[in-house]
Amino acid sequence: MKIISIYPNFKNKGGAQNITIQLAKELNGNTPIILTNTPIEKIHQDYKKEDIHFEKFSIYTIFKYNTPNTVFLSHHRSQTSRLVFLNFLLAGKLKVIHIAHSTFTNLKSLTWLPEKIVAISNGVKQNLIDYFQIKNDRITVIFNGIEDIFHNTHYTQNTNEIRILLAGRICPVKQQIELVKQTKGKLLPHIKFYFAGTGEQIALLKQEIGNSEQYFVLGQIDIGEEMPKYDYVCLFSQNEGLGLTLIEGCMFGKPLISNDLASVQDVNINGYNGFVASTWEKLVTCLNSLPLPNSEKYQSLSKHSRALYEKRFRAFTMINEYRTIIKSFFKNKYER
């Protein structure tokens, strides 16, 4: 089998891009092929370093790579809709799987999805059923999985301080600026926020923080090296498919803090491995009552986070589940 992966934007780094590349590499024996709308010279430098062949997404490249043994994994609904339309014209000669990474409430009439759909969370699945009216049996939930790079490194820190990491692209959807606005001047002195990542709003975020000693902008960091230094991992986005940074937090045994988006509740279970706040006011209350890292409650949350990663979010689990759905196209040729 040949797997052709499709995602439109590789100018920036992000969770969907990372998963697209991870699957492309793991599901192909040879050099993986990714079709994209991003000009090759504008692909993010970190992705250019990968052993991947990037090529322009077009009708020509679809025909070029399509064979009876080809499966197209499309990670964005715009490309998927074009593939579904083309497949209609070709009388079903394309094998297409759509991977839904997020929830949407727009462009319903312009969104065409194939028979086989993967949702990366139960929240995303429910959005497909409720808004796009997709039948339940067409959707398979496969959680994003990441390689285990956890190591028991102990950092000597001020045990009376709580360090919270919020990692992700600094942009309106992730709400870093709004978080500062809504919590500034309301947090106890021992609560510290650290924002990792880059994006179009980084200058505005620094401006909003000003001279505060409770918020810090780190820029791009190495998650494997830096994650152990923090006590909690936070995500309070307007919209998320699952929240890769929360999964990374689980991997390192970090308790989580998030809002109540349906799509993140597969990874942050309120009271079990973290805390869920439905409003900004409740977030402030939550932050000011967080257990200290040396407390029994914190250790319990930490243990549960790691256990949840091991149960749901390992990379090999994700890869095996994708192999199963891909092989279903060839059930008369391959064993399930």
Image (cartoon, rainbow, N blue to C red):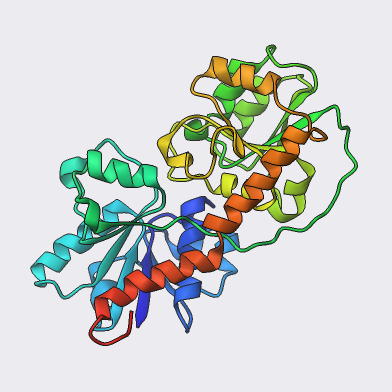
Q: Is residue 138 above or below residue 298?
A: below
**How far across and down, in percent of the image, does residue 200 sit?**
54, 37
On screen, residue 159 versus residue 105, left or right, reads right
**How far across and down, in percent of the image, does residue 303 sit?**
69, 46
Q: How many marks?
A: 0
Q: Residue at x 37, y 75 (%)?
A: 3
Q: Residue at x 47, y 34 (%)?
A: 173
Question: Is residue 218 shown to the viewer in this render?
Answer: no
On screen, residue 175 versus residue 147, left or right, reads left
Q: Toward which corner of the image does residue 188 lie, by quadrant?
A: top right
Q: What residue occupies the far top of the structure in this picture?
A: 185
On screen, residue 150 versus residue 107, left or right, reads right
Q: Is residue 327 above or below residue 17?
A: below
Question: Is residue 13 shown to the viewer in this render?
Answer: yes
Q: Residue at x 39, y 59 (%)?
A: 7
Q: Residue at x 35, y 83 (%)?
A: 1
Closest to the observer: 164 or 265?
Answer: 265
Q: Is residue 304 above or below residue 138?
A: above
The quarter in which the C terminus is drawn is bottom left
Q: Toward which corner of the image does residue 82 lie, by quadrant?
A: bottom left
Closest to the observer: 304 or 62?
Answer: 304
**How far across and down, in percent of the image, does residue 179 sit?**
58, 23
Closest to the observer: 201 or 162?
Answer: 162
On screen, residue 317 versus residue 35, left or right, reads right
